[in-house]
């Protein structure tokens, strides 16, 4: 009995000491733990900023949607719960794959979306069966939506679900509760502006983890709205003009550097990517031979063809290699002294005696073969660099390519090989190693339009604060492209006017009925190398596969005296700049300058 009594006393003493330790000495710690069990800190994601075009048409909005979310720690058997949920809502493989990936990177007490954008029927079916699924709830959210579908996708980009690699780079505090992030284009470049600041709620919960009441709330700060320089209707006109063809249209306002149109065709619907695209649809887009996911305007690198002839002519004048009135015999081909190879003109019989104006107007290859040879590759490269060839333009978007501006140093660095004279010859007509993006061609055209002012391009026009006050974006930097005599600009531009408005110009068909004066230049970029023999070359051109045909290019600005728009158009495998690309540019300029809608007789 004494032993038992001693054990009882010792047990009571241990319990008392433990009670003293928990209630007195560790009071603050256990009080905090108790509060954490009763009160939960729930992040409130901010509303993403809206995106407008220059005329305040909405390009990206937030529409209400419902998500079904699972908190793993509150669910006895997650896999079994998902199995039963699939009887009420449609769960595809990509929903499950994304959910399990999120489970691995998040804490068990964090709520994880299983499916977003539920329809009303799915919401109703779950609501009736809510009692069967502890730890599962439906929450209201906003979902990114692009009302014009794919019209602006290659400029705007899209948002998508945050993946495991992105979460490592983000501010975890500010992105608590946020499931979406900008993936491409403007949505990615201006992520910090559009996202906003996260808010929090202190929520009281019961033993089953269900919300009882909100004790305290810190509201989120919504992201700021942005206004782009794009004209949404002009985007539609450009896409309509391209039709079913692959290509690109980039239009810019020369005086400001604002991008008016930024189109790559074919396009795709960004709404498919917002909540996670299923693998079948994604593979269809990836394997499409027309490459709708490829941003031709920003990352497409094409031989510029004859569109660089006005710049090469300026280089010849600047360095004193040629005078505008100098004439040469431009026959059917050019040969380097002491070489047998023939560099053929696009015109079978050649152009006869030509000066610089006629050479630009009729796009004489032989004239520019000769001029390029006399200039040399390094002087030609040095001068063209001032037009932003070979460098990224610095446009405020994501994914730009820089093209190639070849030189002796460039080839030695890239290939460890010497430069050959024949490579200079073909560079003079925009072939060989040289490549440029449609954006770069539009910038170069803008430099011509402003007679030597290269303005930093931009796609952000203004930021709208919560008070709806527009704050203009910073003015773009300007650089001067100097030539030995400013009159040279007018010589070259007048020749470009003849290209469009003179009967012997290569783009006369689009300029003869224009209600304004256009300066332009057609171009044809060779995709497939042809045989040296003339007859064989002609036969190859007629029988070549459609995807191996020449690209058609056109650059232009208008009106000539006070330019409002500069444009570059590329139609892949279009065959010629005059037949394929020039009509597209004309349709875009007609709408922008005259309000004329393609297919409608009157302005609208």
Image (spheres, rainbow, N blue to C red):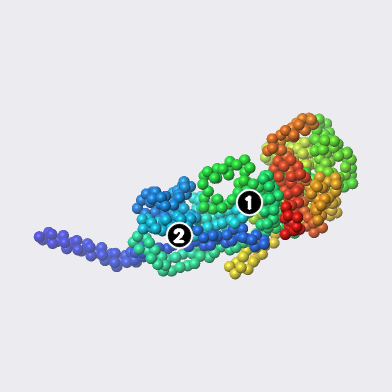
Q: Is residue 233 left or right of residue 427?
A: left
Which residue is drawn at the image coordinates 59% and 56% (left, top)? 146
Would you name the residue on which mark 2 appears? 139
Q: Position of residue 493 (x, y in %)?
A: 82, 52
Q: Is residue 73 left or right of residue 121?
A: left
Q: Is residue 68 left or right of residue 235?
A: left
First-in-chain label (1 vs 2): 2
Q: Position of residue 322 (x, y in %)?
A: 86, 45
Which of the two discs, 1 and 2, sits closer to the camera?
Answer: 2
Taking depth in this image into account, of 373 and 248 the one nearest to the observer is 248
- Residue 484 appears anywhere in the view: no
- Residue 121 appears anywhere in the view: yes
Q: Position of residue 70 (x, y in %)?
A: 41, 55
Asked where in the image residue 62 lies, by quadrant, the reply is bottom right
Which residue is drawn at the image coordinates 29% and 67% (left, top)? 23
Q: Position of residue 554 (x, y in %)?
A: 75, 47
Quick one: SS at disc 1? helix
Quick one: SS at disc 2? strand
Q: Residues within 10 Å of mark 2 (few under 14, many from 20)?
A: few
Q: Is residue 7 left or right of residue 216?
A: left
Which residue is drawn at the image coordinates 29% and 64% (left, top)? 22
Question: Could you say which disc has been placed on residue 530 in the image?
Answer: none
Asked where in the image residue 253 lies, by quadrant, the reply is bottom right
Is the C terminus in the top left, top right, bottom left or bottom right quadrant? bottom right
Would you name the residue on which mark 1 appears? 154
Q: Residues within 10 Å of mark 1 (few under 14, many from 20)?
A: many
């Amino acid at each position: 009995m004494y032993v038992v009594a001693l054990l009882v006393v010792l047990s009571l003493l241990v319990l008392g000491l433990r009670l003293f330790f928990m209630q007195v000495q560790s009071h603050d710690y256990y009080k905090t733990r108790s509060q954490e069990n009763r009160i939960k800190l729930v992040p409130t994601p901010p509303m993403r900023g809206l995106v407008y075009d220059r005329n305040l048409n909405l390009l990206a909005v937030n529409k209400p949607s419902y998500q079904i979310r699972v908190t793993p720690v509150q669910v006895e058997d997650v896999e079994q719960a998902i199995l039963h949920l699939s009887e009420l809502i449609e769960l595809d493989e990509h929903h499950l794959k994304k959910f399990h990936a999120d489970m691995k990177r998040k804490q068990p007490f964090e709520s994880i979306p299983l499916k977003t954008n539920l329809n009303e029927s799915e919401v109703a079916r779950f609501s009736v069966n809510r009692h069967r699924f502890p730890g599962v709830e439906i929450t209201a959210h906003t979902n990114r939506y692009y009302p014009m579908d794919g019209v602006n996708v290659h400029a705007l980009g899209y948002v998508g679900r945050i993946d495991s690699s992105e979460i490592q780079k983000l501010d975890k505090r500010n992105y608590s509760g946020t499931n979406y992030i900008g993936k491409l284009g403007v949505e990615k470049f201006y992520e910090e502006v559009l996202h906003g600041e996260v808010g929090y709620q202190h929520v009281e919960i019961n033993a089953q983890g269900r919300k009882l009441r909100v004790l305290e709330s810190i509201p989120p700060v919504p992201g700021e709205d942005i206004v782009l320089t794009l004209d949404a209707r002009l985007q539609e006109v450009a896409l309509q003009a391209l039709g079913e063809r692959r290509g690109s249209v980039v239009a810019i306002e020369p005086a400001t550097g604002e991008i008016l149109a930024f189109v790559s065709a074919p396009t795709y619907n960004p709404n498919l990517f917002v909540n996670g695209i299923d693998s079948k649809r994604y593979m269809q887009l990836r394997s499409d031979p027309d490459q709708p996911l490829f941003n031709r305007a920003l990352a497409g690198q094409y031989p510029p063809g004859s569109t660089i002839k006005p710049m090469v002519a300026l280089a010849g004048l600047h360095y004193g290699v040629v005078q505008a009135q100098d004439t040469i015999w431009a026959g059917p081909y050019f040969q380097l002294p002491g070489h047998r190879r023939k560099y053929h003109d696009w015109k079978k019989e050649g152009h006869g005696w030509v000066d610089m104006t006629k050479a630009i107007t009729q796009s004489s290859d032989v004239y520019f073969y000769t001029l390029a040879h006399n200039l040399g590759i390094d002087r030609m490269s040095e001068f063209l660099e001032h037009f932003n060839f070979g460098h990224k333009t610095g446009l405020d978007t994501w994914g730009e390519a820089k093209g190639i501006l070849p030189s002796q140093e460039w080839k030695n660095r890239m290939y460890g090989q010497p430069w050959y004279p024949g490579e200079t010859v073909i560079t003079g007509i925009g072939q060989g190693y040289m490549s440029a993006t449609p954006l770069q061609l539009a910038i170069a055209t803008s430099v011509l339009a402003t007679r030597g002012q290269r303005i930093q391009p931009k796609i952000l026009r203004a930021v709208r604060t919560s008070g709806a006050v527009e704050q203009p974006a910073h003015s773009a930097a300007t650089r001067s492209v100097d030539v030995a005599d400013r009159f040279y600009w007018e010589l070259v531009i007048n020749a470009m006017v003849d290209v469009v408005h003179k009967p012997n110009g290569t783009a006369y068909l689009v300029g003869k009925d224009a209600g304004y004066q256009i300066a332009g230049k057609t171009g044809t970029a060779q995709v497939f190398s042809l045989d040296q023999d003339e007859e064989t070359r002609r036969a190859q051109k007629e029988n070549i596969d459609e995807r191996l045909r020449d690209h058609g290019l056109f650059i232009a600005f208008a009106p000539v005296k006070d330019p409002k728009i500069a444009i570059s158009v590329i139609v892949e495998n279009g065959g010629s700049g005059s037949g394929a690309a020039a009509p597209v540019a004309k349709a875009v300029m007609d709408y922008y300058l005259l309000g004329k809608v393609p297919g409608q007789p009157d302005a609208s």
